[in-house]
Amino acid sequence: MKLSAYPAFTHSAFQSRLAYRNQVWANAFGDLVNVFARIAIWSAAYAGMTVVDGVTLPEMVTYAVLVGTVLRWDHARLLHEVGDAVRTGDVAVYLLKPLHYPFAILASHVGHYAFSFVTVTIPVVLIVGFTAGLMPPASLFHAALFPVFWLLSWLVMFCIATLCGLLAFWLLTAFSLEWFLMGIMLLFSGAVVPMWFLPPALATLFSYLPFAWVHYYPAAVYLGKLDPTSTWLHLGMGLGWLALLAAAVAWLWSRARHRIIVQGG
Amino acid sequence: MAPIISAVGVGKTFRQLKRQAGFGGALRGLVSRDYTEIRAVEGIAFSIEPGEAVGYLGPNGAGKSTMIKMMTGILTPSAGTLSVLGREPHSNRILNARDIGVVFGQRSQLWWDLPVRDSFELNRHIYDIPDSRFADNLAYLTQMLDMGSYIGRPVRQLSLGQRMRAEIAMALLHDPKILFLDEPTIGLDVVAKDAVRRFLAEINRERGTTIILTTHDLVDIEQICPRLIMVDDGKLLFDGELRHLRATLGSRRRLTLEFATDPGPLTLKTATLAADEGAAKHYLLENEAVSLIDVLNEVGPAHGLKDIKLEEPDIEEVIRTFYLNKPKLAGSAP
């Protein structure tokens, strides 16, 4: 098949989200509360101080916005979709078509993300920007590299959530995996507390795990907490993790597919 | 012409984990694993020519869906050789997928939240259907399946009958050479069933699309498929034309003779007396070759014959008798 079929999945997924307009309001409100809660916590923690460990409060507000909405991926939707499809055997519908399932899923989730970016992320960023205030990227270099890290973050998250979804095939439940993943992401990715406030031992450990590329590194690049050399280095490491995770998805999918076509699901 | 599908000794065995009862059993299951072998399909052989419409019939668990899954390339046979359009379907899944259309009665391929038309549009991209071909097919299918009133509505708002028609249309947009349908009329009401059946018969006749259809419903087969393949317990029981099934299964026609007055006991060579009500006598015709003329000739003009009625056994009844007598038949099979 031609590659042009996959963008059609992106389009379909985007369209299908329009069917649930109320969800847009709920999601935007949820993100807004999430971001303001983070801002309130950091404001309280700073308790009148201007700089803690070399990080200012406005920087932490910006970090909260980046992690709370710009880099907030809907991994649960993806995990459930993949988990349900393999568990119930609906994945057979994809196998009947001349296409590759992981790419079809990737394409449709680009559509889902594009939809929430337009309807949730942009409005939330604007609202927070006008009320609490946002910092611009630290430099032109960091501004240029942030979108690259942002894309990398999305792809790493895609692979991790797809892996968990595929595991549902053997574990028969996506629900517990979702909780597991949510817990891991909160702690390991720097989603709640950035690495610079963590005990050094933990920070060192977490900074090498792939989860850090989902939240911490993109935000750190935006704020200029990584110098150019370190930025390039971490981009390379992130790409390495992405390759590894993508290979793991391919391997697990081929195992699942093999089991479906041999065992009938 | 070369067959479009050929199966030789096709079998499929599943391994199923044997679970032991109770908590202790569950613990034991963690260390040692016993498997039970389940033979879903065994030694199936048939050959289907292009343009045929074949009904694949059997009770629940007879291995119908397993066979369809093997022919569509999403299950690997564990024995025998299977060829669809000259290819091994599971090792050529993507090539095979381009040339076949599949409808699962119990699994939807439409996008739940999107209008029917959008799902069709997605298929246009997936199968890379040329624009003019797509437009022609869409117009034809919309008219034939009477989808005009709901093609712009989201799938979640459709009735089951409307949805099933849309599923069938979706499977035909890319001009597949073979259309597989797994229980396409399941859960439909009489009117919707009829619409689906007439359409499938039409598409088979007009476009020459080969149709393979599994069903529990004999009427599906009577109206769509001249040829019937019957399976049970994974094994082939019958393969041939529906009208030959009766002969093969040895079921008998019923003959009723009505006389003006009771002619007294009347034995015939061509038919066996089953019940005698005096003026009305009921016979069974054991021999398929015996015609009504033969009977009339034998009875002759002497008895004052007033009316005659010959009843073909209804197909449901034939098959019911067949399954009930199965152990006997299986025992006598070579």
Image (cartoon, helix red, strand yellow):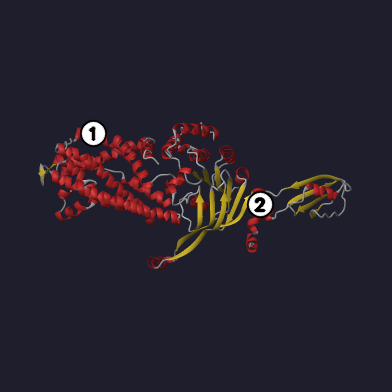
Indicate the position of residue B122 as horizontal and vertical percent values.
42, 37
From this viewpoint, which residue is outermost toward the right?
Answer: B302
Q: Name the kind of residue labelled 2 in the image.
A: Leu
Q: Residues within 10 Å of mark 1 (few under 14, many from 20)?
A: few
Q: Nearer the viewer, mark 1 or mark 2?
A: 2
Q: Name the kind of residue labelled 1 in the image.
A: Ile
Are labels 1 and 2 assigned to the same chain? no
Q: Is residue A84 left or right of residue A138?
A: right
Between B152 and A23, the one nearer to me in the picture: B152
Residue at numbered disc 1? A127
Indicate the position of residue B251 as horizontal and vertical percent values.
70, 54
Residue at numbered disc 2? B245
Q: Is residue B306 visible?
A: yes
Residue B152 vertical position relative to residue A75 in the rendered view, above or below: above
Disc 1 to disc 2, C-alpha distance: 75 Å
Q: Residue at coordinates 67% horizontally, 54% vertically from top-left?
A: B248
Indicate the position of residue B76 as horizontal and vertical percent values.
46, 55
Q: Quadrant of the C terminus of chain A?
A: bottom left
Q: Residues within 10 Å of mark 2 (few under 14, many from 20)?
A: many
Residue A155 falls in image quadrant: top left
Residue A159 vertical position relative to residue B116 in the rendered view, above or below: below
Q: Identify the subunit bearing mark 2.
A: B
